[in-house]
């Protein structure tokens, strides 16, 4: 299809609204890199779009900031730009959002979100769980309950429990865990992101550790898209700790290696 | 925890007497130096507009939470790249947020045509009126959007809140794409002037 391309300058509004894609955007960014006036105009238009954003403000989910703080703990910050480059805002944003913009390619290392799998963790966990609920609802309507659905039900019950609490923890060998637990249901749902891949002779195993000793609480399945779980563990007692170890494939009745995560429940 | 301004009114609607814009820029400077308390304060300022905007574009609540968290984290990560000489801190944050939101929508939306058919172009503007929390920013923006021509307003809101490209907006409105891009620019300029934003 032959697409007629408008005069670059008239695209300033569309650019500020993120309404340009592909070659339209590349073309405009090339223009922007040479046009100081356009750059100033875009900055002004962004002040206006920021007001559109402010007008859309809604109460954020309660865990959002907590999860961002937890994720920030493990995220190295970008160093400031020290070279005197003619980089403008769009260029830096381009670098920031993973786009190699006109000047952005020069100004900063293009980052294709290498950090994402590790860090979207808790939100991703919450989402996995939400997806599990949605899946359960969809399946129960149409199908007989299989094992998968029963598991989904148990997960949904924990998440919907009035006392459901979310915790996150770092795993010393790499990765982060997000746990939703309900003491009422004596259960917890475990998810993790960015776990170090294991040899086929090994597996991750969860433990519920209390005064009565360590009970195996389930083995983790292999990751999908960097995410592990959700896995449900039951039989939770007040005062228990949740542990994670690396065990021989097939699991162990008792932990045989050092804990790589311990979390008070 | 350090905070300033109202949770839901980043431009100081409820927090009269404070200057959250300036605070936010200063806080970002501290965040760039790795100050976690400052980051918490920044999150407190920006979480509501970030989440609201992402939610408006992405729609799905679960995905919106994920994208909003990515945005907050990006603010932490890239704080050193914020330059107060080039615009306000809130604008810097919201550019990141909006781009992340539209990136998410566009990467998921393999079939743009299906989306377009499903869309009703009245939705974007009505939602501004109905769903956003009542706050002063909201009132001002609503008033100023009302001062645009219908085509300007639809072009701007469909792109910003709907996450559509200008070519998609042109298809939705049955108008030439060149006309739409012009109206987006005129509309934003008028909005900027009506809102009295600096620059």
Image: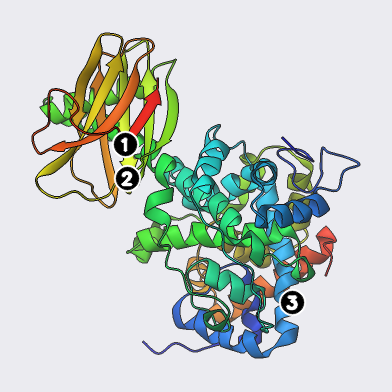
Residue at image position (59%, 50%) is: B53
Q: Tell me whether circle 2 and circle 1 mark residues in contact (CB < 8 Å).
A: yes
Q: Secondary structure at mark 1?
A: loop
Label 1, on which residue?
A260
A38 and A118: which one is in front? A118
Image vertical order of residue B139 relative to residue B177, above or below: above
Which residue is at the far right? B17
Label 2, on which residue?
A173
Quick one: label 2 or label 3, which is nearer the N terminus? 3
A212 and B118: which one is in front? A212
Counting from the top left corner in percent of width and height, residue A23 is at: 46, 83
The mark total stands at: 3
**Camera-side mark, 1 or 3:** 1
Residue at image position (39%, 17%) is: A161
Q: Is residue A34 left or right of residue A18?
A: right
Quadrant of the image occupied by residue B161: bottom right
Label 3, on which residue?
A41
- Residue A143 in view of the camera: no
**Camera-side mark, 2 or 3:** 2
Quick one: label 2 or label 1, which is nearer the N terminus? 2
Quadrant of the image occupied by residue B41: top right
Image vertical order of residue A243 relative to residue A201, above or below: above
Residue at image position (57%, 64%) is: A78
Q: Secondary structure at mark 3?
A: helix
Q: What quarter of the picture does the N terminus of chain A occupy?
A: bottom left
């Amino acid at each position: 299809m032959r697409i007629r391309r408008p005069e670059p300058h008239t695209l300033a509004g569309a650019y500020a609204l993120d309404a340009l894609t592909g070659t339209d955007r590349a073309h405009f960014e090339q223009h922007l890199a040479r046009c100081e006036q356009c750059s100033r105009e875009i900055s002004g238009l962004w002040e206006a779009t920021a007001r559109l954003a402010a007008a859309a403000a809604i109460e954020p989910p309660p865990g959002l900031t907590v999860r961002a703080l937890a994720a920030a703990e493990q995220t190295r910050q970008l160093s400031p730009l020290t070279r005197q480059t003619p980089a403008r805002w769009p260029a830096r944003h381009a670098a920031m959002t993973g786009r190699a913009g006109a000047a952005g390619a020069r100004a900063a290392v293009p980052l294709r979100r290498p950090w994402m799998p590790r860090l979207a963790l808790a939100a991703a966990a919450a989402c996995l769980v939400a997806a599990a609920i949605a899946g359960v609802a969809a399946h129960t309507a149409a199908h007989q309950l299989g094992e998968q659905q029963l598991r989904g039900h148990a997960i949904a019950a924990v998440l919907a429990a009035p006392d459901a609490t979310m915790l996150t923890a770092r795993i010393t060998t790499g990765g982060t865990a997000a746990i939703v637990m309900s003491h009422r249901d004596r259960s917890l749902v475990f998810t993790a992101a960015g776990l170090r891949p294991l040899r086929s002779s090994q597996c991750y195993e969860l433990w519920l550790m209390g005064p009565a000793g360590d009970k195996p609480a389930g083995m983790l399945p292999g990751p999908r898209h960097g995410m592990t779980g959700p896995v449900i563990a039951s039989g939770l007692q007040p005062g228990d700790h949740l542990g994670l170890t690396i065990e021989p494939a097939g699991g162990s009745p008792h932990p045989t290696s050092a804990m790589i995560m311990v979390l008070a429940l | 925890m350090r905070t300033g301004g109202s949770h839901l009114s980043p431009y100081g609607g409820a927090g009269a007497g404070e200057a959250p814009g300036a605070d936010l820029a200063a806080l970002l400077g501290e965040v760039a130096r790795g100050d976690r308390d400052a980051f918490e304060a920044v999150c407190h300022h920006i979480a509501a507009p970030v989440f609201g905007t992402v939610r408006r574009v992405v729609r799905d609540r679960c995905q919106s939470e994920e994208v909003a968290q990515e945005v907050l984290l990006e603010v932490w990560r890239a704080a050193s790249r914020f330059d107060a000489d080039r615009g306000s801190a809130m604008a810097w944050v919201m550019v990141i947020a909006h781009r992340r939101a539209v990136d998410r929508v566009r990467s998921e939306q393999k079939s743009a045509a299906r989306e377009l058919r499903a869309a009703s172009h009245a939705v974007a503007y009505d939602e501004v009126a109905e769903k956003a929390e009542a706050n002063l920013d909201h009132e001002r923006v609503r008033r100023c959007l009302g001062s645009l021509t219908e085509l300007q307003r639809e072009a701007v809101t469909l792109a910003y809140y709907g996450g559509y490209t200008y070519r998609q907006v042109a298809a939705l409105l049955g108008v030439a794409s060149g006309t739409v891009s012009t109206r987006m620019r005129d509309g934003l300029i008028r909005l900027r002037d009506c809102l009295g934003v600096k620059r």
